[in-house]
Amino acid sequence: MTIDNLVKTFYANKLGCVVCIEQSGALEINSNNFKVITTTGTYLFKRHLGQQDLNKIQNSLNIGQYLLNKSVAVPKMIRADDGELYCFNSDAYWTVSLFVDGNYFSGHSKQEVILTAQAIGKLFKALATLPEDIYPPEEIHYNLQEWDSLISECFQRKNEWISLFGLEIAQLLEKDWKVMESSLSTIKKKSVVTAELVPCHIDLHPHNILVGENFHATIIDLDSIKLANPKSMLAFGVYKLMRQYASNVIKECPVQEIKKTVWDFYKEVELDARVMGKEEDLLQYYAMMEVFRRICIIIKQNLRNSHSDWNHVLPIQIIALSEIKVLFECF
């Protein structure tokens, strides 16, 4: 079924007629997302393929509606003509939201940085009150014992690195192995506590923040809301967003000014989030926990399943271990 027929069948009363379908603008469009302009406005159609069951889709939609009711800046969902927030056609579920016209977070201006921090703070505050009956089903855990074992096994199989990871990743591991070992050792020494699990957005990177007119920041990818440790996810989000800011201003701003902006961003988020409390001096270690978790997932996929799908992001994660120390030195 074409998008035009989908609109006519399920959304004609709400959306009118299709004017055109575009794959341009600030929002990254892929084969399962369609920017659709109709006689009533501009919308994002999302196709949910078979691997996502209806319960997960409904859960994500319920969370989105709750956040909207709490005045959190997330995309507004559009109901089909039958009142549902989704429809089913051609072996896939479909959802529709208002298209968010904006650019990815860059941190080019102080106003963008502060307004984005405020949006994230409101998100954490609202998720802290999410009713348990719409909690996300997936949980994020940190298992230091498993990481120790995995890193040890990986090093013992050093002679297989090229066949497992490819030459480029093998050379990276050779170069930065001591950084990884020392980072894991530091995390263990700091006794960072991550047992608390609450609903959190686990992927607050620049491409999940769309900044529109007047620097209004909208948080997208609500499928990334899981049960996770709030301190780790706040710290990881601060790192990812402030890394983007730093990379854009490093040539024009002194390092101390950059570090002050990182601190200001964190403090603005924490005003509403109220996650870190007296542990803000451990912020970098909470961020390192999340980065190391992602590194271990990639390594485990290679060692256990010979899956290299995420190898392209391994260099980013390993570099992050060093970048976090620099960005958070003032904490």
Image (cartoon, helix red, strand yellow):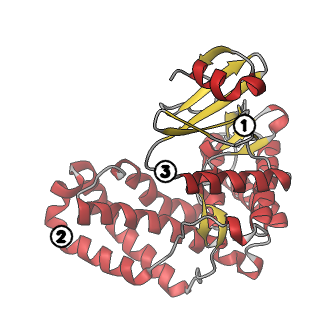
Q: Amino acid at mark 1?
A: Asp
Q: Which of pointers 3 and 1 indicates the residue nearer the eye?
A: 1
Instruction: Say left or right for 95 vs 264.
Output: left
Q: Residue at x 46, y 38 (%)?
A: 91
Mark in front: 2 vs 1: 1
Residue marked by disc 2: 157
Spatial CA span between label 3 and label 2:
35 Å
Residue denoted by label 1: 82
In the rendered structure, the answer to whether residue 99 lies left or right of residue 319 reads right
Sequence-wise first label, 2 or 1 = 1
Name above or below for residue 64 compared with residue 34: below
Q: Position of residue 62 (x, y in %)?
A: 71, 55
Q: Secondary structure at mark 1?
A: loop
Say which residue label 3 marks. Answer: 52
Which residue is the extreme one toward the top?
A: 19
For label 3, the SS is: loop
Residue 265, above or below 193: above
Question: What amino acid does circle 2 point to?
Answer: Arg
Secondary structure state at the residue bearing disc 2: loop
Say which quarter of the image contains residue 215: top right
